[in-house]
Amino acid sequence: MPTFEAQSDAGFYELVNRILMRSDARSLQERRIRPRMEFDTEQRIAPWVDKSPSEGDFITVRCFDLNKGGIAFFLDEPPPFRKLVVELKCPQKRIYVLAEVAHYAPVLLYPNGDIVLQEAEDVFEEEDLPDLGQPVPKILVGCRFLSRWTPCEGSGTSGTSRAASPSG
């Protein structure tokens, strides 16, 4: 008989799969073990600093892509945190995942959703670039999922996780 943890993990992967299918995702061409899928939607994140986040710590971010192992989203500034909780929601359900920042890079986000690394745009002359509108400077943050996370009922100041410790 499957354990509760195995059932939770199966439910998590099923939810990620449903979210990916609903987002009309297509695979990005890259050399990853797990292909990332476009995920242009708003979700919420909360930094994990010294203690688990409360409801008031969550902010809404625009996401870029998602796979079973991680998520990428945009911030206005480099992340001042290493660990975070990601809230993934679809109409019927919300799940929380403990994650860690794997990398981040300054990018230019164009109105059509295209992104260009800021350092790469410096290589091209302005007249060589297609007119995609005025880009907005952003930080693209890539995160790795660590484990499921459950906010405690009531206080909202602590949670449970199968991860050994969020610090480190």
Image (cartoon, rainbow, N blue to C red):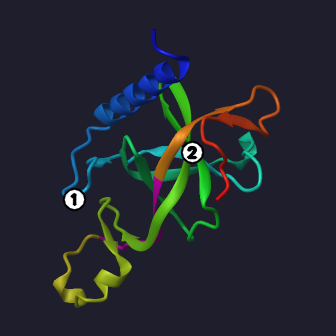
Q: Which residue is mark 1?
A: 31
Q: Helix or strand or loop: what does disc 2 sit on?
A: strand
Q: Is residue 92 visible?
A: no
Residue at position x 25%, y 88% in the image: 126
Image x and y of residue 147, in percent: 54, 39
Question: Which residue type does callout 1 highlight?
Answer: Arg
Q: Is residue 66 visible?
A: yes
Q: Tell me which segment is drawn in magenta.
A: 133-143
Quadrant location of residue 21?
A: top left
* Nearer to us in this view, 80 or 60: 80
Q: Residue furthest top?
A: 1
Residue at position x 60%, y 61% in the image: 82
Q: Which quarter of the image is occupied by the C terminus? A: bottom right
* Nearer to us in this view, 43 or 112: 43
Q: Which residue is mark 2?
A: 44
Image x and y of residue 98, in percent: 58, 44
Q: CA distance from mark 1 to mark 2?
A: 28 Å
Q: Is residue 98 above or below residue 124?
A: above
Q: Residue furthest right?
A: 155
* Nearer to us in this view, 142 or 39: 142
Q: Is residue 39 above or below residue 133?
A: above
Q: Badge 2, how many Cα within 10 Å: few under 14, some, many 20+?
A: some
* Left or right position of 40 against 51: left
Image x and y of residue 163, in percent: 60, 41
Question: Mark 1 or mark 2, which is nearer to you?
Answer: 1
Q: Is residue 155 above or below residue 66?
A: above
Quadrant location of residue 16?
A: top left
The label number, if any, that marks residue 74 in the structure image? none
Question: Which residue type does callout 2 highlight?
Answer: Arg
